Structure formats: structure tokens, C-alpha cells
Amino acid sequence: MTKRVYEVAKEYGVSSNDVIKVLEEHNIKATNFSSVNDKEKDLLDKAYHKKAADNQGKKANTAQSGQNDKGQHKKENGDRQNQNKNGGNAHQNDNGSKHNNAHNHNAGGGNRSQQPQRNNQNNNQNNGQNNHKKGGTPAQGTQQSQQNHQQGDNKRTKYFGHAKQNGDNRNTSSDNKNRHNNNNHGKNNNNQGNNRPHTLLSNVLNKGKHKNKRNKGQFANQHTQEAPVKKTKNYPTSIELPETIIVKDFAERLGREVSEVIKKLFMDGFMATINQEIDYETASIIADEFGVTVTQEAPPEDPTEIEEIVDAPETLKTRPPVVTIMGHVDHGKTSLLDAIRQSSITSHEAGGITQHIGAYQVRYEGKKIVFMDTPGHEAFTAMRARGAQVTDIAVLVVAADDGVMPQTIESINHAKSAGVPIIVAINKIDKESANPQQVMQQLTEYGLISEEWGGDTIMVPVSAHKKIGLDDLLENILVLAEVLELKANPDRPAQGVVIEAKLDKGRGPVASVLIQKGTLHVGDTIIVGSCYGKVRAMTSERGERVKKAEPSIPVEILGLNDVPEAGDILNVTDEKTARSVAEKRLEKKRSSELHVNAKVTLDDLFNQIQQGELKELSLIVKGDVQGSVEALSQSLMAIKSDEVRISIVHAGVGAITESDIMLASASNALIIGFNVRPDASARKAAEHENVDMRTYRVIYDAINDVEAAIKGMLEKKYEEHITGRAEVRQVITTPKVIVGGSYVKEGKITSSSKIRLIRNGIVVHEGAIDGLRRFKDDVKEVAEGYECGITLENYRDIKEGDEIEAYEMVEVAPE
Ligand SMILES: Nc1nc2c(ncn2[C@@H]2O[C@H](COP(=O)(O)OP(=O)(O)OP(=O)(O)O)[C@@H](O)[C@H]2O)c(=O)[nH]1
């Protein structure tokens, strides 16, 4: 039997990517799922035997473990991306590399607000390189970089940051990019070594420091002169410092008089007072002058966080895949879920009462697969917007008689944006009008090319009604799951995600949880979002009481003190921690209720880019017709910027919907609408999720705004305020005018209002009111809940069901 690439890779104990690379060296194109023929197998045999022979020549053990390590890492990081690529899905790959880029940026000093220790390590490495270059012999450099305290190193980068520009061959592209972003201001270069906000003070001190270097002898003398007196005291040789410190406390840690510290600061050109706060960089420069090395104190623990447990690779065990079914309305998502569920219930289980707990397990060929119970991408995206992701594989249902429809495209984009691989189920193949080939053809436009056609997306023809192809679908889910190497450590305190929660009259708060790591047991103390409690009872989707739940298993739990939210994370911990962390979270939630997490906005774009917080601007483009959506998307993508990359997360025809908002929220995107408006639920969701939506009537304006926002030149003089909405309930035609007999649903309509006429979410006209009447009288305004007759200036095409949106432009005071 011929084997597929991933199977062969397993035999050699290498990653599929390695095998693909070897085949590529022989001009053979392959993917994870490609079959490997005898000739190819021979080539691989040779390649791997040769490698093995090579390795023997070297230190066998090290080489071997290196290889294995590499294989493993590659698998973990690469397979999902690989699968994404297999889906012909450039965007997913982009996502992967985006993350890497972001990381690199941070390592190079991009992220100034957070300072993970890891970054410091990277920076120190760089500093070591700089030392080599700058002064002394390499040996000295190495010695120095090893002996010097981390911060000493950081500081050195600060002073000699420009050394990098002299052409260190080892500069990575991210280094270059950083340098570019930093614009070669000495200040920023200095900052490269540590991701800390740069203050005026440290700038001043840098200058001072150079001066000091020059006058080193002089200061050294001062040190030696002072030394005999101070020797009697026991000064610390190394201290830990927080991100910022008050001068008085700093002096205390140094074991020096405050006046001495202030003097040093003064000599370095900075006037500081006893109660002034100085930053870490400044403090470390001064400490260095006192001959004290500094390390950075670990940031204070966040009392609302539960410490993350890092699982050693050897503790990880294979876990079942978690699948979400997505697709267009009526393409058969629910039918497929039901069909799979029914066909998986074996006769002895048939008596059990199945109940809805948000997800259910099926068994196929002895292996488990977990299906999320709520089909469609909405729940999936809402969960992502809350920061939780449970889905490993998306099954995209496309009806063979209907083909690719708007929500099919939405689903593809939602899955891509989340980096979740897609399997296509072409449903309703029992129908006479079914045309699976056409579906396959249409899907190629969205980067999903079937394996049959040389692509890498698994496409399975099915019929939920006739139960055709279900085995094939399940088998392919398991194959993909194997490639993805889904693993978790079951032997640790559990961590999971709430998929549904409610208050049950008899049982109290009930939460359905999908366990992601560890095993949850009855009796465990848990914290779930800002709720806590002890697991009193657990039930499976078959209504059976269970005592434990392992990774990927959904269970309904009782015993919480309150109802958590979908997307909340469950952690097992001790009672004291659970209670105190839950309380802290509740406090935090209350205090930050008003400012929902900061999302990208056009007004604040420039700021965020400048702060290095935003490297990619994600956009969702909605328009009235396909042509304008395409034109707008292409023009937006064509905006050139060195600082920020523009990516279109989703583009589609029609009104801005709640689903668009949730996607924008989950992917921190801006929404650009052209000739379309948000519907009522979208408006509400946008407000709740803090998503910035901009609607335009002229493509050029949209492009201009985005471009100006990126460059920080957005002119914002006027802001649109919606004053009211009316629905046209009857159209009255008179010889002179067309009157829209309307009902004011929200706010008020005034005779001087500017208006938009909206039909099915599309703006069909924008202009002004010509006449506003109640009964026979002209009126100035009509309030909510009243009927009126509206005529529009220079516009007659009013239809029943149209919405009239009244707005005014309000001047916004400059910031
Ligand atoms: N002939 C045929 N009809 C099907 C098949 N699967 C589903 N249908 C029919 O298609 C219609 C829609 O099926 P649903 O399962 O409700 O579709 P859905 O995608 O869940 O729809 P929403 O929940 O509205 O998004 C129903 O009338 C089903 O009976 C199939 O395999 N063959």
C-alpha cells in the first residue's frame, strides 16, 4: 500500500516538512497528504541513510538528539501552518509569520510597554556581539558579556547602539527593520537593548555618560578618593531594581546617602529631587557609577492571573480533535451534526438521553472526535473575541446544489483568521441538482484546492440525509488530527474553556466546559473567569455522571458561585487562590467596565503605530456590490507604509453585520463600509465590542482616510451624529412628489436633517429632507414613536421598507 508523506516522515522519525524538502531537492512537489511512490521512497531511503551515516561520523548522540529536537519543533510549529498552506491559504501562513515577526520585533526592542525577560536575554546576546565589534578582542568581548551583569550589557547596547550600524553581519532582518523604524535616532538605538520606555532623563544621562567615559580617570579618582571612608560600610555589589524607583528608595538599595545619589544624577546632567521617580535605565547608569551591578526585578505578579503551568514535551499525550462545523445558512450544518451524532451512537448507548452541553464526542475506529454543538462561525468567533480558541479543525459545509455563498466565504475567512485548518464537506450530493465539481471549482477562488486537483484541502462529498460519506469525513478528520499532532498533558491540574453557561433554577450555575489541558475531577477547586467553586458534579453529553474529564472532553459542571461567560478560562487551584483571584478579577472587571479592551481605531492609528503597538492593520471591507468591494480592497492593500502592513481579513457584499463586528473584534480589525450601513444588531455589537466602523460613499475618501490615519494626518473636524431613524411604511405618490409615510423608530427626524436612504443595508441615496409633515402640517421635527410624511430633496425612488437615517455633522474640538 502506498503511504502518504506524513506517514513516511513518521517512519524516518522526521517531520513531514523535512521529507517534503528532500523531495523538493529532487524536483518532486509534495504535501503532507501526497502519496510516496517506490522511486520517491528510494530517494528518501538514500537521503536518510546518508544522513544517518553522516551523523555517525559526528558525535552520534548530539547529532541525533539535535535532529529529533528539530523534527519535533518543526512539527509543532510547522504542521498547522503547513496544513494551512495545504489549504492553499496564503492568509493563514501570513498569520503564522506575522506572529513570528511580531516576536522578532519585540526581541529587537519594538514593544516598549512590556518587558519579557526573554527579550532581555536576546538583547544581551546582541550586546555580546556588539562588544566584540566595538572594543577589545573577541575574547575580551565574550568575557565581558558573560561576566557583565545583564543590565551592564543592556546599558552597553545603549551607549554603543550605533555599533550595529557598522555592519554586523549577524544582524537579522528584524534588527534592520527596527533600526529603520527607529529612524536612527540615537535615542531609539539606545533603546534597542531593552524594551523600556525611554525617558528624557535617560537621554540626558546618555549624554552625560559619554562625557563620563571621556573623563573616566577623573571620576575614577573620585571613587578612589572616597573609597577609604566608605570602605567601612558594606556596600552591596549587586542589586535588583524595578522598572521605576523613587530616588530615596534607590539610594537605600545602594546603601548610599540620598545626597550622594542626587549628586551623581546632577553630575550626569539631571536635577532630581528625593521623591522623584527615575527609570530603570537611569538608575542602572548611576548604579554602575557606584560600581554596583543591577538586575531587573521580576514584574509584580498580576493578582488576577493564575500562573501558567508549562508542560514538558514528554508529558504530552495525544488528545482528540475539536471540530466546529461552519457554512452558509441551510447548507446542512445541523443535519450533518445530527447525522454524525446518530450514526455514532452505538446500540447499547441508544437508550441514553442525549442533552445539549455545547459539544459532544463521537467515537470512530476507536478514536474520539469532539464536535462543537453550535454550528456556524458566530459562536466560534465570539469565543475568539473573548480570547479563547477551542477549535482545532473547521468542517466547511457547502451544499452541492447551491455552491459557495456569502456565509461560506465568511466562514473561510473566519477560520483562516483564526489559523484553523479547513476540511470541506460537500453536502446534499443525493440531490439531482448536486454539482460537487462546481463547488470545488468555486472554492479554488478562495484558496481551497481539492487534493483531487493537486491541492491540499481535503474535500469529502457527503449527504447528511442519506448518511453518505460520513465515515470518509470522520476518517479524514482523524487523519488531519494526526498530522496536527494535537497533544496535551492529562496529568496536571485542569485548564479549560467555558463553551456555554446558564443559571438553572434547581441546580444553580451550570457551565459547559471543554477541558484543554490536565484532567478535571469532581471535588476540584476551580476558578472560572471571575467565578469560583468546587466541582460538585460533572455530566457528559449523554447525561451520564462522570468523575473526571480529560483534555478535549466536554463536560457540564455544577458547583460555581456564579454564572461565568462563554470563553472564560477554567483553572484548578486551591481554595484561597480561587477566591482571592476571582474577587480581584471581579474588581478589575467592574472598574474597567467602561473602557472595553482597547481596539484599533482610525483616530488612534498613528499613535498605536508610533508606539510600536501595531505592526499590521487588519481591515474588514463591506460594500454594496462585488466590484466596489474588490476595487476598495485592492486600493487599500496598495497603500504603502514602512511601519504597518495592511491586511484584509474579510471582504464581502452586503450590510455590516454582527458577525463582521465579532470578526473585527476577534482580529482587532477596522471595518470600512462602502455604500453600506450596519444593521441594528451590528451597531449594538460595535458599541459593545468597541469596534471602529467607517462608512463611505466615495471610495477615494475611504482610501484617503486610511492613508492619512497611517501617516497621522487624519483631519477630524466633524463627526457624524445619528439623530434618528424612521421606517418607510407606505409610499404615497402625488403628481408632484413621492412621500414616504414613515414611522420614527429611534430618536427624532428634523426638517433640517441630512439623511441616508437605506434599503436592505445598502445606502441607495444620501441627501437632505425636502418636506416633513404630520398629517397636513409642515413640522420642524417628529419624535420617536410618531408617524410622519417625508419627502426628499431631488429624490423620488422611495420604497416601502426603506430606512431613513437622519444625522447631523457635529464639529469636533481639536484634541
Ligand atoms: N437532500 C438533502 N437535503 C439536506 C441534506 N442536508 C440537509 N438538508 C436539508 O437542507 C435544509 C437545511 O438543513 P439544516 O441542517 O437546517 O441547515 P443548516 O446549515 O444547519 O441551516 P441553519 O441552521 O439555518 O444555518 C433542511 O431542509 C434539510 O433537510 C442532504 O444531505 N440532502
Image (cartoon, rainbow, N blue to C red):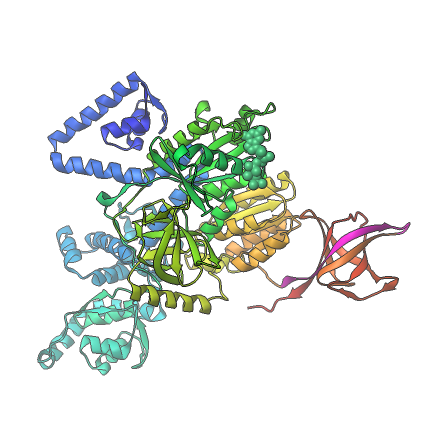
- Is any part of residue 698 visible from this angle? yes
Where is residue 267? Give x, y as percent.
26, 76
Residue 346 at x, y = what percent? 40, 33
Can you tell which quarter of the image residue 807 is in? bottom right
Residue 726 coordinates in the image, percent (x, y): 73, 57
Quarter in which the C terminus is drawn: bottom right
The N terminus: image quadrant:
top left
Question: Ligand 1 is in which quadrant of the figure?
Answer: top right
Q: Which residue occupies 38% across, 68% down?
A: 583
- The outermost residue toward the top is 39
On the picture, is 149 further left or further right than 344?
left
Closest to the observer: 23 or 383?
383
| Residue 728 is covered by the magenta coloring | yes
Name the side, left or right, on which 29 lies relative to 229: right
Q: Which of 72 and 423 is in front in this view?
A: 423
* Residue 611, picture quadrant: bottom left
Q: Quadrant of residue 301?
A: bottom left
At x 26% / y 71%, what residue is drawn? 283
* Residue span colored magenta: 718-736
> Residue 137 versus residue 589: which sits nearer the camera?
589
> Which residue of the protein is positioned furthest toward the right in this rendering?
735
Q: Position of residue 727 (x, y in %)?
A: 74, 54
Using residue 26 as the reference point, say whether residue 617 is left or right of it: right
Specify whether 532 is left or right of 504: left
